[in-house]
Image: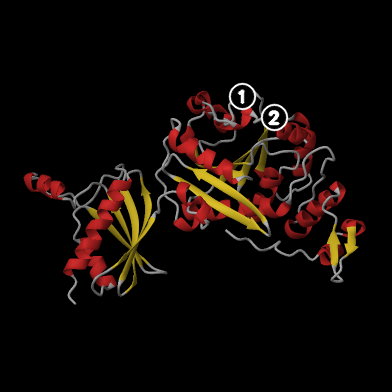
Amino acid sequence: MDVGPYEIIDFGKLADAFPPLKPFLFKSASGGYNLNFKDDAANRTLTQALLKRDFGLEVTLLEDRLCPPVPNRLNYVLWISELVKVLGLEEPIVGIDIGTGSTAIYPLIACSINKTWRFIAADIDARSLAAAQANIEQNPQVKDRIHLYSTTQDAPVLSPLLSENLARLGLQHVTFSMCNPPFYADMEEVNRSAENKEYNPHAVCTENDRRECKLERSIWYTSLLGKMSSVTLLVNSIKEKGLKIDNYAITELVQGTTRRWVVAWSFTDIRLPDTLARPKSSSLKSIAPQPNSLHHPTTQPITYESLAQALKDVPKLQYQEIQNPPRILATVYEVTWTRAARRRMARDVSPIKQVQNEDAKPAMICEVRVVDAHALEVRWVRGRDRIIFESFWGYISKKLDTSVPA
């Protein structure tokens, strides 16, 4: 995912909009202005300038705390916004920021962009929480939608998801979680960890955490990572170590020469489109999730009408036409297209029920469309069993290949 608002920053114009930045600028060889990025004060002022000009946010940055760069923080928020859009959920949209830091930059940016979102911002450091509270209070346009949560080193990482904590906010679940591990209070801690190759145990979700904080209380969990090796470790962990999750996503965020990666995973049956879930980078191919969109070149010309008829002929399938672009939403409650299923239905003398029980949960939902006269495409929307999805698609593809006249 390439995000371009900060691909090139005109520091001269930015300083005109935020004069405190001017003392930190110098003339470059090209005649424009540049910034000394090795100066901590310059970096703090740059963050303040971008937040003020582009989001209307006022922040105070502590000298002994990490200064969050706005561009890659924004990229993460924008990717989350796309994720939420795909989910198509009703309000409220609530996020959790694990390790929000002294700036609370993710909740501030996210709530300034998305005017109805709410946030729980958690941290273990009292001084960071006090600074975050001050920053939130400076911004009346978002302050009523951000709730700070003080936790401890020994508490479960996901303690904000404990039922009693959510109940205090009138919530039963949240939409997503964000975090940017490992968590450090200041640069001294960063350096010490790098020297000793320490990893903060608070960044690890334990088996006890999983028991206490029901994982379904967040629809999607996400984490921003700065090393590709960390991506591999995290993906292997969620796929293998007790969780065995196959519903996950990887995306690469590119800002100039800086690359970051987001890994997201869900315990629900909601499947993301490949544009959000599968990275373009070939270096991540070995750990990328399996595609949720499949393409089938047909042997004979097809039409939307022939596709619609093929779907209507599937017993017990619910069918809904959607426009812009034209596609069909197919909802399957049970497998009826295999030979075994057809034999079973032939033995069943009771009439096929056309209307499903309102409480019944679909086994699979997918969107099917005609790409052109010789190509079909399907996107898996919901479901836990990939075998059902691929079996259904194989059946429809084969039926159209063999039944459409040349």
| Badge 2 amino acid | Ile
| Location of residue 196 in the rendering, given as x and y in whole percent from the top left corner | 71, 29
Residue 185 visible in the snapshot? no
Image point (46%, 42%), residue name: 266
Image point (83%, 37%), residue name: 64
Task: Name which of mark 1 and mark 2 comes first in the sequence.
Answer: 2
Identify residue for label 2: 124
Label 1 CA crowd tier, 10 Å (few <14, some 14–19, many 20+): few
| Location of residue 258 in the rendering, given as x and y in whole percent from the top left corner | 67, 54
Image point (50%, 35%), residue name: 172
| Location of residue 43 in the rendering, given as x and y in whole percent from the top left corner | 82, 50
Identify residue for label 1: 155
Q: What's the mark number on residue 187?
A: none
Q: Is residue 11 left or right of residue 336?
A: right
Classify mark 2: helix, strand or loop. loop
Residue 333 visible in the snapshot? yes
Quadrant position of the C terminus in the picture: bottom left
Q: In this view, does 253 lie to the left or right of 208?
A: right
Determine which quarter of the picture holds residue 194: top right
Do labels 1 and 2 touch, CB within 8 Å?
yes
| Location of residue 350 in the rendering, given as x and y in whole percent from the top left corner | 10, 45
| Badge 1 amino acid | Ala
Label 2 CA crowd tier, 10 Å (few <14, some 14–19, many 20+): many
